[in-house]
Image (spheres, rainbow, N blue to C red):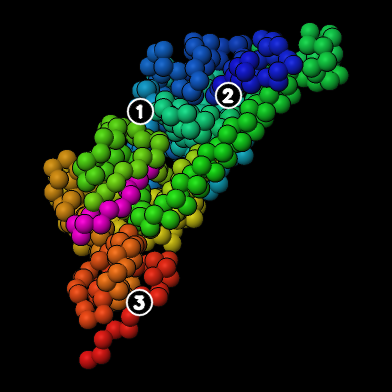
């Protein structure tokens, strides 16, 4: 993503010769020691794209998985099954897969030399364009593989970033994705056609004083990308400050806050639409939701809380995305309760639960109370066994509405468990205090006494502190 003229200092006119030359996937030039026939999404037959997978045609993809201790072959196959779904979501076709068991990754090519030759032969046989590894490749491994295979080599991280780039719609979401992609691409900057290895010394380079003596085009590209990264980071810090202001406003209003979290495509947005009569965008694809959406939710006891839909998680979620989406993911860490939505019809719901909890721990939300909700109960009877295995969990269907009443009741009960019941004595003339009690907590009972209104209400610690002068001792036996 090349910065435009508006990103340059005011005293500099835009100069296209100073554009960032980013190799979006890997080296976008013929390897130095071959015949120039590099094949791939961004190779000789590919076009230009802001993502990592070309979509002017359906790219043919080969998948590669490596089983490392203590994992088993079944784990590798499950990872490749999910990677195939990711590739399909990104707009490409999987034409085969290769699996290898190793004690440790090969430093130069991740897989062994013999397996590289086998992979090259298979790639030529199926006429694939790109090879995708289920584990993250280092820049050196990526370059070595592309040189050996004469095809683009990318990893799971690049595919996920590509999908995020497709789905980002809000200004914040686009900035977060762009930042993550720049952080991923920065160590992978390489020139095209050898142009970036040439030095530009002063006027001889055509850019005058813009480059120091001996500064290469690659160094200029790196400097420009870093400048863009710093600008995006500053913009997102400003967004984080706005979110902090909103969070403090919610705390002052004493409204409960529930965050819907879960694996991607578990049905979080559909469930929010069902229980809160919301209109959140819903699509049966991975990572359809990237922006946090908050709606007012009415609970059975009459109290209202705020419910927020969040971005879905996945195994091996790229750390670049976790860092870039920090301000959005903090919604989960600041919630009073997490409704952990799980796809009951998934082949591996337990694995998805573990993956989500791992991400929650990374973002500091592991200590937030959690309510498991097994969604899509209309598509599988497996939910019955899952609910038995996880005491306190509920099952629902966002499509039919089955179980949503149980879900709302469980949310209300969990939120009440975070409060304490108090008996308050309010003088008849203090209607303002009665109104404040209703705002601060949940009124359980209210009756007229001899000296004023006797109110039983559930309050959190902050509400109890504000109403301390009116808290009365519990009546004796």
The residue wearing badge 2 is 26
Q: Secondary structure at mark 3?
A: strand
Q: Earlier in the sequence, mark 1 or mark 2?
A: 2
**At 26% across and 76% down in the image, what residue appears?**
452
Q: Quadrant of the N terminus?
A: top right
- Examine the image and state in which quarter residue 221 appears: top right
- The residue depicted at 40 percent of the width and 35 percent of the height is 290
Q: Position of residue 396 (x, y in %)?
A: 19, 50
Q: Which residue is mark 1?
A: 89
User: Are there few (<14), some (14-19), or many (20+) residues within 10 Å of tag 3?
Assistant: some
Residues in magenta, as a range: 299-311
Q: Indicate the quadrant containing the C terminus: top left, top right, bottom left or bottom right.
A: bottom left
Q: Is residue 318 visible?
A: no
Dot 3 corresponds to which residue?
Answer: 471
In the rendering, at what x and y percent does residue 187 appear?
64, 32
Q: Is label 1 or label 3 in front?
A: 3
User: In percent of the image, x 71 and y 26: which residue is there?
Assistant: 223
Q: Earlier in the sequence, mark 2 or mark 3?
A: 2
Whether residue 79 sits left or right of residue 276 in the image: it is right
- In this view, the residue in front, 133 or 178, is 178
Tag 2: Cα neighbours inside 10 Å, few (<14), some, or many (≥20)? many
Q: State the residue lying farthest toward the front.
A: 429
Measured along the vertical axis of the image, is residue 266 above or below residue 97? below
In the rendered image, the vertical position of residue 379 relative to residue 386, given as above or below: above
Question: How many numbered marks have been drawn onto this rendered protein structure?
Answer: 3
Q: Which mark is nearer the camera, 1 or 2? A: 1
Lower sequence index among marks 1 and 3: 1
Q: Is residue 392 magenta?
A: no
Task: Decide which of 247, 418 is in the foreground and name it.
Answer: 247
- Residue 133, labelled with which disc? none
Q: Measuring from the top left, give residue 180's x and y in whole percent.
A: 54, 34
């Amino acid at each position: 993503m090349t910065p435009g003229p508006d990103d340059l200092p005011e005293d500099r006119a835009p100069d296209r010769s100073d554009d960032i030359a980013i190799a979006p996937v890997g080296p976008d030039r013929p390897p130095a020691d071959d015949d120039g026939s590099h094949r791939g999404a961004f190779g000789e037959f590919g076009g230009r794209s802001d993502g990592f997978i070309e979509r002017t045609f359906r790219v043919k993809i080969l998948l590669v998985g490596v089983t490392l201790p203590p994992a088993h072959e079944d784990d590798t196959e499950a990872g490749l099954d999910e990677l195939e779904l990711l590739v399909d979501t990104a707009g490409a076709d999987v034409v085969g897969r290769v699996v290898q068991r190793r004690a440790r990754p090969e430093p130069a090519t991740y897989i062994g030399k013999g397996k590289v030759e086998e992979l090259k032969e298979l790639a030529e046989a199926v006429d694939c364009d790109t090879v995708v590894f289920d584990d993250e490749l280092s820049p050196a491994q990526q370059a070595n593989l592309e040189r050996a295979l004469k095809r683009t080599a990318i990893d799971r991280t690049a595919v996920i970033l590509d999908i995020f780039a497709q789905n980002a719609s809000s200004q914040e979401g686009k900035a977060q994705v762009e930042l993550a992609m720049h952080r991923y691409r920065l160590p992978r900057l390489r020139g095209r056609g050898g142009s970036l290895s040439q030095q530009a010394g002063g006027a001889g380079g055509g850019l005058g004083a813009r480059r120091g003596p001996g500064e290469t085009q690659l160094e200029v590209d790196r400097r420009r990308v870093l400048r863009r990264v710093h600008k995006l980071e500053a913009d997102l810090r400003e967004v984080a400050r706005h979110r902090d202001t909103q969070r403090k406003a919610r705390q002052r209003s004493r409204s409960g806050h529930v965050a819907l979290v879960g694996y991607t495509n578990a049905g979080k947005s559909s469930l929010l639409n069902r229980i809160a009569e919301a209109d959140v965008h819903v699509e049966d694809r991975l990572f359809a939701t990237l922006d946090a959406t908050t709606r007012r939710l009415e609970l059975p006891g009459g109290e209202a809380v705020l419910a927020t839909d969040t971005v879905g998680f996945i195994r091996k979620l790229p750390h670049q995305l976790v860092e870039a989406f920090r301000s959005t993911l903090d919604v989960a860490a600041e919630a009073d309760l997490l409704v952990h939505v799980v796809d009951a019809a998934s082949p591996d719901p337990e694995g998805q639960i573990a993956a989500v909890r791992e991400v929650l721990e990374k973002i500091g939300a592991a200590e937030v109370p959690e309510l498991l909700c097994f969604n899509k109960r209309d598509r599988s009877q497996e939910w019955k066994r899952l609910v038995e295995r996880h005491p306190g969990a509920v099952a629902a269907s966002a499509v039919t509405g089955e179980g949503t009443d149980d879900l709302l009741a469980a949310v209300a009960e969990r939120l009440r468990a975070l409060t304490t019941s108090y008996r308050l004595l309010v003088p008849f003339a203090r209607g303002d205090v009665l109104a404040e009690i209703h705002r601060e907590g949940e009124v359980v009972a209210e009756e007229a006494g001899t000296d004023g209104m006797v109110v039983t209400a559930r309050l959190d610690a902050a509400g109890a502190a504000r109403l301390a002068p009116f808290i009365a001792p519990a009546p004796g036996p």
